[in-house]
Image: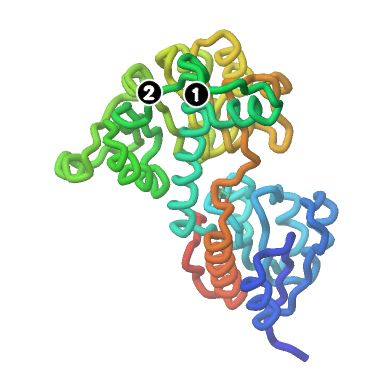
Amino acid sequence: MSDLPKIFLTRELPPSSMKQLRERSQLTMNHEDRALTKQELIAGLQGVDGLLCQLTDIIDDEVLGANPNLKVVSNFAVGFNNVDIASASKRNIAVTNTPGVLSDSTADMAWALMFAVARRVVEGDRFVRAGRWEGWAPLQYLGLDISGATLGLVGLGRIGRAMIPRAMGFNMKVLYWNRTRMDIAEEHELGVEYAELDELLAQSDFVSLHVALSEGTKHLINEQRLGQMKPTAYLINTARGPVVDEKALVQALQSNVIAGAGLDVFENEPKLEPALYDLENAVLAPHLGSATIATRSKMGELAIENCLAGCAGKRPPNLVNP
Ligand code: DGY
């Protein structure tokens, strides 16, 4: 009988991770390419030591309570708002995430959205494909320059920080707002300025969100705050959908309170506010921030190390329980 730990995986990971998991654990898994229901999660958890799950799996108190011997929930994501941390801690279940390895890919995605929406790449693509292009025109699809513009970073964790060198490459002025302010010497070294949120919203040409989702950040960007942005400004969200009040955003986009939005995340994924589908000034992506082959493979490595450590009763490298 194998003494390898028993792990339940909720959805297939990149090939290198699958190989590791098969060699280093007694693996059971969902083979279908879809998120599991609560009942399926509960069934899968029976008799295992560890759960390796995705941000689409809601790991609530009932799920955590389904297996009294569960030692670890390893989330294949940096965000962990899908897991009830208080319940896990109460049950002595370690919860882990995959920080660091996806910061560059997610910052790149924020940049892709900035370009796509401000330089109207997606609108232009639709126009060309529809066979409507009749040649160059001086007033066709005019957008906003990114070079030299002001970028406002809301949240300055790992991903927010990864935005800074990119912004420097485009000669941008960078403002940031964060729970804790850096010391002045560090701000100077990085070439960024601290601003209160109201001020950042009023001054930025691009507002890019990089806060984790919590009670404190839910609907941080609401009707009132959208109204504080410049009418020529763009909102970029690669963080979590509920940080933005999506209904208020739709209204702001419809009535040109702001110029546009580049969105990789949504309030009720995969459902969107219906009006978003029809808005030309919004670029919509299906939560692709970390979606590169290399990054997803590195996330797999971290998630596996965390899961195996937790199964062995050791402190996992990326523990998130307080
Ligand atoms: C995360 O890791 O939290 C991203 O949203 C998806 O990879």
Q: In terms of secondary structure, where does tag 2 sit? A: loop
Q: Give the residue at x 52% y 39%.
A: 238
Residue 221: mark in rendering: 1
Q: Give the residue at x 74% y 71%.
A: 48
Q: Residue 179: where, in percent of width, then height?
A: 35, 36
Which residue ends up furthest to the front in the rendered image? 135
- Specify how the rendered protein is coloured: rainbow
Mark 2 or mark 1: name the one nearer the start of the chain: 2
Q: Nearer the viewer, residue 194 or 306?
A: 194
Q: Nearer the viewer, residue 219 or 110?
A: 110
Q: Give the residue at x 68% y 31%.
A: 129
Q: Residue 316: where, in percent of width, then height?
A: 51, 68
Q: CA distance from mark 2 to mark 1?
A: 16 Å
- Please identify, in this view, whether the residue under mark 2 or under mark 1 is nearer the observer: 2
Q: Nearer the viewer, residue 58 or 321?
A: 58
Answer above or below: position of 100 versus 147: below
Let me know if residue 203 appears in the view. Answer: yes
Let me know if residue 60 appears in the view. Answer: no
Residue 205: mark in rendering: 2
Tell me if 54 is positioned left or right of 153 in this view: right
